[in-house]
Image: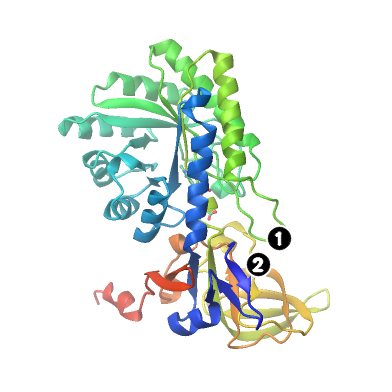
Amino acid sequence: STGVCRSDDGALSVAGADLRAVAAEHGTPAYVVDEADLRARARSYAEAFAAAFAESEGLAGADVYYAGKAFLSLAVARWVHSEGLRIDTSTAGELAVALRAGVPGEHIGLHGNNKSDEELVTAIEHRVGRIVVDSLGEIERVAALAAERGVRAPVMVRVTTGVHAGGHDFIATAHEDQKFGLSLASGAARQAFEEILAAPSLNLIGVHSHIGSQILDLAGFEAAARSVLQLRAEIAEETGHLMPEVDLGGGYGIRYTGADDEPPSPAQIATGLATIVHAVCAELGTEIPRISVEPGRSIAGPAGLTLYRVGAVKPVALDGGGERLYVSVDGGMSDNIRPALYGAAYTAALANRTSAVEHVTARVVGKHCESGDIVVHDVALPADIGPGDLLAVPATGAYGRSMASQYNLVPRPPVLAVTEGQVRPIMRRETLEDLLALDLG
Ligand code: LLP
């Protein structure tokens, strides 16, 4: 995160809070989030999209939805909403947090490929701004639930454009053989639009495309935008209904290690998308829609790091000669599943001191009972690293706490917000009592 500094005596700090003091007061492992940094990222999306899609430029405006799946808590929901973002949810849990945080229903969207009745009813009763339907069966269900309540529910249709992009197969979502969306190629998407238009309790507001996640190149978004704008024009031709909105999803990548490419900035994303939307609508001779996007990772990810305490340290001989230093920390795959699940690369830095000794090839591993419990595959760390040292792993603010588990009955770490040097837990650490409280004996 931009607020990480090393002080003269060698310790790392986040937004003015010394990580040695943070660890001493709040324990480890802990997620540490720089509030100002997260807010600034949210604000720069809001500002960039407002500027690039300004109605004065002949465009129809834009909305930015923060994808709550990346990390949602009451504080985060309030931060991003107060910076001008709406909130994209995909479960009853995310909806409950957004609503409890005071975000008005009209500023909330609901996703999901298998929404429950409870989720749909909550969304309809709170008059959410959009329900993104993902299957033909869902259309009938939303129509019936809305009709029973005398409401006209605003819906979008999630389509799969066939654009393949994303950091890993598990997070690429717009190719044909996967569970999300309605396929353009198969005609299922067409049928969805017809069914929605025929249902008096549904208001067809737009078409949605999400092509994947951790994408660093804008070309895939541009191809998807072209495809859904064309579809929108065709639907208008066939039915006379020109959908007022187009959502281009989330998925903008971030830098995890020094080896990653520079990610696009919100301004580059917004201007790139505005250019293509403008050009394609001019070609098609259709009015420009209101655009929305749903970034999650690129807002929360870089603003957070995980702070661990080092325990066991063990040199292990490698087959080809040489050795690797295995540095165990007090968390692991329960607080960051991404290396095990996606082969995701991270880096780590000694946080409590600097060291003048040589650096050696190290692997940071967790405390779980699996050899795949790796936090950082390869990182150069000082040879004298030992028990009691602190390690900081940057860029864990998205899909860290939100995907955390209690594997091996390890309580989940707290989330500590730092604002101008002040540390405030926004989610507390789980305790063994919390774990036992669920066990009915
Ligand atoms: N909108 C929709 C419909 C999505 O499915 C997602 C992510 C987003 C927005 C936000 O994408 P973002 O801007 O955060 O990339 N757990 C994986 C990422 C899965 C993303 C799933 N959908 C990971 O840790 O990499």
Question: Among all residues in the image, which is located at the extreme right?
Answer: 321
Q: Position of residue 29 (x, y in %)?
A: 49, 76
Q: Residue at x 77, y 79 (%)?
A: 359
| Relative horizontal placement of residue 305, taking residue 236 as reference (left or right) | right
Residue to which mark 1 is pinned: 258
Q: Which mark is residue 162?
A: none
| Relative horizontal placement of residue 151, taking residue 26 as reference (left or right) | left
Badge 2: residue crowd in 10 Å (few <14, some 14–19, many ≥20): many
Quick check: is the Cβ at mark 1 less than 8 Å away from ligand 1?
A: no
Q: Amino acid at mark 1?
A: Gly
| Relative horizontal placement of residue 273, taking residue 260 as reference (left or right) | left
Q: Quadrant of the C terminus?
A: bottom left
Please tell me which residue lies in front, 11 or 332: 11
Q: Residue at x 64, y 56 (%)?
A: 255
Whether residue 412 is visible to the viewer of this picture, yes or no, is: no
**Which numbered disc, 2 or 1, marks the residue that appears first in the sequence?**
1
Q: On screen, 19 above or below 147?
A: below
Q: Quadrant of the N terminus?
A: bottom right
Q: Disc 2 and disc 1: Cα gap in Å?
A: 8 Å
Q: Position of residue 14 (x, y in %)?
A: 55, 70
Q: Residue at x 57, y 71 (%)?
A: 373
